[in-house]
C-alpha cells in the first residue's frame, strides 16, 4: 500500500488531559475505521456511566484507583492496569477513588462477547496471558488485557513494555488485510520519550515517518509496519489495541513480518 508521508503523519494523536470522556480516535475523524480509542479522566469522587450501545468496549486503568458498579458482574475495585470488557448494549458505572485515567478501546460489536474483569498480575507464569516476545534488543514483556481466547467480537488488547532503550514490534510487522491497530502510550512522562515508526512498503526507509511518543500519545496503524524504540535509560510502555475487520479474523497470528528485516 502506497500512502503519502503527510497522511502517515496524521496517524499520531495526543489524547486530552482535561477531565471528562474524550473521543480520541473514531472513524469520522481518523485513519482507523475499525479500531476506536477513548480516554476517560476522572477526579477523586467523580462517576461516569460507560454505555457501549453498538460498540464493544475494553477499558484499562492506566492511573489511579476506581470502583465499578451498576452491572451484574462488574462490581470490583480497580487498581492500576486492571481491565474490563463489556459487549454491546451494556453499561457500567465507574467511580474514581483516586484521580484516574482510563484508556478505552472500542469496535463494532457483532453480537459476540461476554462481560469480563481481568485483574493485573505481573507474577503470572509465562503462558496465555503473560508473555515475552522477541529477543536481544527487540525483547519485550507483554500482558494481555483482552486475550484471543476471551469472548469478544473484534478486539484483542494488551500491554507492552520494552527493555531500556530497546525496540518493540521488531522485526516490523503488518496485518492490514485483517486488523487495524492503535498504540496508546503511558508511564512515559516528558522529558522521557520514544519513537514510533510508520511505513507502508517493505524496507522503504526513505519514506518512514517517525512519531515522537510519550504519555498520552496514541498512534494509529490502519496499514503498514509500526516498530517502536525507546530513548536511552527509558522504556516504551503502551496499550495496544487490535480490531479485526470482522469476527472471523479476530486472531493474533495474522501478522506478516517485513521481509527486509525478517531474518536480519
Image (cartoon, rainbow, N blue to C red):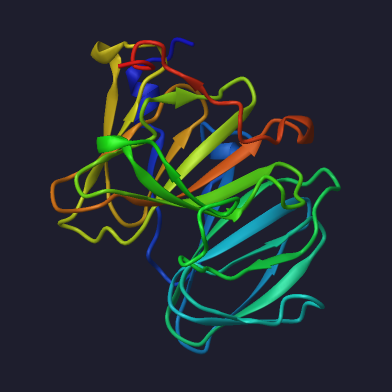
Q: Position of residue 121 (x, y in %)?
A: 51, 69
Nearer the observer, 116 or 10: 116
Q: Is residue 49 left or right of residue 185?
A: right
Nearer the observer, 239 or 26: 239
- Tell me the quadrant of the picture where the C terminus can be found: top left
Question: Image height check: is 15 above or below 35?
Answer: below
Residue at screen point 28% across, 52% down: 214
Question: Image height check: is 256 above or below 169?
Answer: above
Q: Position of residue 137 (x, y in %)?
A: 25, 37
Q: Position of residue 87 (x, y in %)?
A: 77, 57
Residue at screen point 19% across, 53% down: 234
Residue sticking out furthest to the front:
125
Q: Quadrant of residue 230?
A: top left
Residue at screen point 57% across, 49% down: 157
Residue at screen point 48% across, 81% down: 65
What is the total number of numbered labels drawn onto the structure image?
A: 0
Question: Image height check: is 42 above or below 35?
Answer: below
Q: Is residue 42 left or right of residue 226?
A: right
Q: Quadrant of residue 98?
A: bottom left
Q: Position of residue 201 (x, y in %)?
A: 40, 11
Q: Quadrant of residue 207?
A: top left
Amino acid at each position: 500500500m502506497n500512502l503519502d508521508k503527510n497522511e502517515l503523519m496524521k496517524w499520531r494523536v495526543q489524547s486530552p488531559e482535561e477531565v471528562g470522556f474524550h473521543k480520541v480516535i473514531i472513524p469520522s475523524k481518523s485513519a482507523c475505521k475499525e479500531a476506536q480509542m477513548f480516554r476517560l479522566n476522572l477526579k477523586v469522587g467523580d462517576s461516569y456511566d460507560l454505555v457501549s450501545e453498538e460498540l464493544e468496549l475494553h477499558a484499562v486503568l492506566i492511573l489511579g484507583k476506581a470502583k465499578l458498579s451498576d452491572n451484574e458482574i462488574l462490581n470490583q475495585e480497580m487498581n492500576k492496569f486492571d481491565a474490563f470488557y463489556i459487549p454491546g448494549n451494556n453499561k457500567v458505572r465507574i467511580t474514581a477513588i483516586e484521580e484516574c485515567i482510563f484508556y478505552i478501546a472500542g469496535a463494532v460489536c457483532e453480537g459476540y462477547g461476554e462481560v469480563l474483569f481481568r485483574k493485573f498480575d505481573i507474577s503470572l507464569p509465562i503462558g496465555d496471558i503473560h508473555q515475552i516476545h522477541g529477543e536481544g534488543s527487540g525483547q519485550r514483556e507483554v500482558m494481555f488485557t483482552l486475550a484471543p481466547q476471551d469472548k469478544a467480537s473484534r478486539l484483542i488488547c494488551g500491554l507492552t513494555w520494552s527493555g531500556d532503550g530497546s525496540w518493540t514490534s521488531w522485526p516490523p510487522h503488518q496485518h492490514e488485510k485483517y486488523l487495524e491497530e492503535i498504540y496508546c502510550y503511558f508511564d512515559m512522562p516528558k522529558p522521557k520519550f520514544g519513537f514510533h515508526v510508520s511505513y507502508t512498503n517493505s524496507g522503504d526507509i526513505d519514506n518512514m515517518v517517525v512519531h515522537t511518543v510519550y504519555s498520552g500519545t496514541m498512534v494509529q496503524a490502519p496499514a503498514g509496519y509500526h516498530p517502536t524504540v525507546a530513548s536511552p535509560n527509558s522504556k516504551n510502555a503502551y496499550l495496544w489495541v487490535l480490531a479485526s475487520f470482522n469476527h472471523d479474523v479476530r486472531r493474533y497470528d495474522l501478522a506478516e513480518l517485513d521481509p527486509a528485516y525478517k531474518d536480519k
